Amino acid sequence: MKTQTGYAPVNGLKMYYEIHGAANRTHPPLVLLHGGGDTIRTSFGHLLPALARDRQVIAFEQQGFGHTADIADRPFSFVQSAEDTAALLQHLEIAQADLFGFSNGGTIALQVAIRHPQAVRKLVVASGFFQREGSSYPWFWDGFPSATLESMPKELREAYLAVAPHPENLQSFFDKCVQRMRTFENIPAEAIRGITAPTLVMVGDADVMRPEHAVETFRLLPHAQLAVLPGTDHMALMTRAAWVVPMVSEFLDAAMPETTAKQVALK
């Protein structure tokens, strides 16, 4: 499989990206948005090869994540990451793409669809909050103010250190990830309701996000499908390739809803 890597000048960043496979007329590119604390591999390592068999896949690492160096005086934010995503697509001369976001990447995908609807054809949102009330556990939000580097999963810590251009910034990276969650702002329900892109909402039945929150997201979106994976917690969600890849592929391959197709044609 042909893979291209590079760094794109995006909003003051040198953003690391990978392009797997060649563009084709049948499928638009699929853009992968990794989770908080993750790299491309820790979020999508189990899924990427299979997803790239039939379509071009673009994966990138956000500000300060993985291979992409941080901007010291710029905090991490979901809105800024959405703007960086849109800017990367523009740099790569991609007018419209499908987006697949996991965890924080799912929240970013929603923000891209809200802020840049013309750039998004379809969405896959896996365990992505739009409101703080979506957590399954009362301690989820309460734990961030006291979080320490020692609580960062070993897999994520090692992945960062292996590829970061400045591994000595691990503590700063962790602190900025935590701060983004501490200052999480709800996305208004009306904004979710205004997303016209067909969306596949996914969650594990033992996820950090309540299945009810996934159902609420599904109910608000005008063109949505819902998948609840049994026996699956947050960390396992992106390892279920035998379930996730066929569902995502079938969803992306399906015809656009007639009303949405007309809206896209008028843009």
Image (tube, helix red, strand yellow):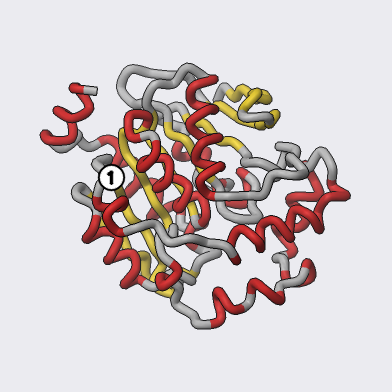
Outermost residue on the front side: it is: 73
Outermost residue on the right side: it is: 168
Image coordinates for residue 201, horizontal then vertical, percent: 33, 55
Image coordinates for residue 213, horizontal then vertical, percent: 34, 68
Q: Is residue 24 above or below residue 57?
A: above
The quadrant the C terminus occupies is top left
Helix, strand or loop at mark 1: loop
Which image quarter: residue 186? bottom left
Taking depth in this image into account, of 5 and 246 the one nearest to the observer is 5
Mark 1: few/some/many CA within 10 Å (<14, 14-19, 20+)? many
Taking depth in this image into account, of 133 and 215 the one nearest to the observer is 133
Q: Is residue 58 above or below residue 90?
A: below
Outermost residue on the left side: it is: 258
User: Which residue is rendered at x = 63% and y = 49% of the image?
Assistant: 76
Outermost residue on the bottom side: it is: 138
The quadrant the N terminus occupies is top right
Image coordinates for residue 158, horizontal then vertical, percent: 78, 55
Q: Which residue is mark 1?
A: 195
Image coordinates for residue 154, horizontal then vertical, percent: 74, 64
